[in-house]
Amino acid sequence: MHSTSEAILDIGEASEKVSKVMMTCPTLALDTALNQTGVRVSPDLVENVLKRFENAGMSAFRFFEWAEKQRGYSHSVRAYHLMIESLARIRQYQIVWDLVNAMRKKGMLNVETFCIMMRKYARANKVDEAVYTFNVMDKYDVVPNLAAFNGLLSALCKSNNVRKAQEIFDAMKGRFEPDAKTYSILLAGWGKAPNLPRAREVFGEMVRAGCDPDVVTYGIMVDVLCKAGRVDEAVEVVKEMDESNCRPTSFIYSVLVHTYGVEHRIEDAIDTFLEMERKGIKADVAVYNALIGAFCKVNKFKNVHRVLQEMKINGVAPNSRTCNVIISSMIGQGQTDRAFRVFRRMIKLCEPDADTYTMMIKMFCEKNDLEMALRIWKFMKSKQFFPSMHTFSALVNGLCEKGDAAKACVVLEEMIEKGIRPSRITFGRLRQLLVKEGREDVLKFLHEKMNLLVKEPLYG
């Protein structure tokens, strides 16, 4: 099969065309529909589509396989990495290893390939598999270096397996000479645990090893202390940075402002923001989001408006996180109409993300306004935004709550079609409803669909 008809040169236009097919076409009929688009496949196009459809699992894999068959095209390392991430997200590990072997044959494997897999295994709480991935690097002719060692430790720490990470660090630190990043990873892991005494131990060991803390290490220490409710101690660390000629970053100030907001210390949050500006550190969207969050916590929405105005004057564009903070706060306070008004304004300023759509759909479902929830869903699809598992679940749960088994089945079937496995809770709710209505036949059909497209997808 080869690309036919006139080539579409513009990547954006080609990407839109492919995205439309991916959103509307059943997975098993995708090849034929893609052939009919007439797009010329290029590395940029494939990477663009795979990034956009990172939640699409098996649909993305169908596209990936189709692209590989096109004349004059071969996958880039980044395309393989995007596909590996997407498949690992839905736990299609067999296909992931098939892709690793394909990369090996082409001499494309690198340390980052294995770091991605370690991250994904650890996130799925498959600790042994993450460690195994590190240990087999040699067999794939990729030498495990400090970056790979740090990648393993980071994967374990981020998935709440810091004790295992520490155990591996203690066993292997003679083989790899730890750097500031290594210690920072462990520091963050113990901070997340949370275990402040162990975090302090790591910090002390780092200094004793003659490894000077850098701005990232200090930033993590500030974050660890703030999460442990020691914000005043965190401020002392920032002062220590000033004395060491290590200039604090806007990230560090965003952590302080956010923590003061959580503790309802709004005056301290404002003072910290102003101190940052006095030091000539330019406020970025993360600090503004922290300040907005602080004002939302104390219900000062007029101040939120002022911050948004200041952002506009300073040329700092709001992002989806900005709007999510405001919307979440308004929903939490029962101000659902205002939350929807913010959403409507937001879609003119920036692209909503999966959290935005999930919040809005859930909000309307809880208000018993299924019509509006479905309108948001339809709008999201029109924007060619691929829903996450949580977004699908929010709508299925809302429809089940309303007793609309037929619509809930349609949405769940689409979810399975896209290679996304519903959570036990979501599937359980629909099962209850179908059993109550005596629709075991539909339940059996959905089970078969899951087995076909999720457990053993697209083979043969």
Image: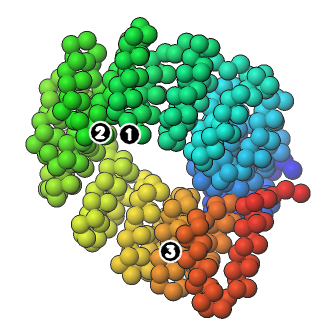
> What residue lies at 52% left-to-right and 16% top-to-bottom?
178
Residue flagged by tag 1: what amino acid is it? Pro
Quadrant position of residue 425: bottom right
Graded by Cα atoms within 10 Å as few (under 14), some (14 to 19) or many (20 or more), the crowding at tag 3 reads many
Residue 188 vs residue 99, the one in the foreground = 188
Q: Which residue is mark 3?
A: 397
| Left or right for 325, reference 359 | left
Image quadrant occupied by the C terminus:
bottom right
* Foreground label between 1 and 3: 1
Label 1 residue SS: loop
Q: Tell me the residue at 54%/31% (across/down).
A: 165
- Between marks 2 and 3 in the image, the one whose residue lies nearer the viewer: 2
Left or right of 317 in this view: 28: right
Label 2 Cα neighbours within 10 Å, binned few <14 / some 14-19 / many ≥20: some
Residue at the bottom extreme?
Answer: 438
Q: Which residue is mark 1?
A: 194
Mark 2 / mark 3, whichever is N-terminal: 2
Question: For residue 198, what is the image quadrant?
Answer: top left
- Location of residue 225 (image quadrant): top left
Q: Residues within 10 Å of mark 1 (few under 14, many from 20)?
A: some
Side (left or right) of 39 relative to 337: right
Quote the CA–CA distance across marks 1 and 3. 33 Å
Residue at (31% x, 60% y) in the render = 327
- Pointer 2 residue: 228
Three-letter code for the amino acid on which mark 2 is drawn: Ala
Look at the image and tell me whether residue 202 can be seen.
yes
- Residue 222: give x, y in percent of width and height: 29, 30
**Looking at the image, is 177 positioned above or below residue 415?**
above
Q: Are the two marked residues, 2 and 1, in contact with CB atoms closer than 8 angstroms?
A: yes
Whether residue 406 is situated above or below residue 328 in the rendered picture: below
Tell which circle, 2 or 1, labels the residue nearer the N-terminal end.
1
N-terminal of the pair, mark 1 or mark 3, is: 1
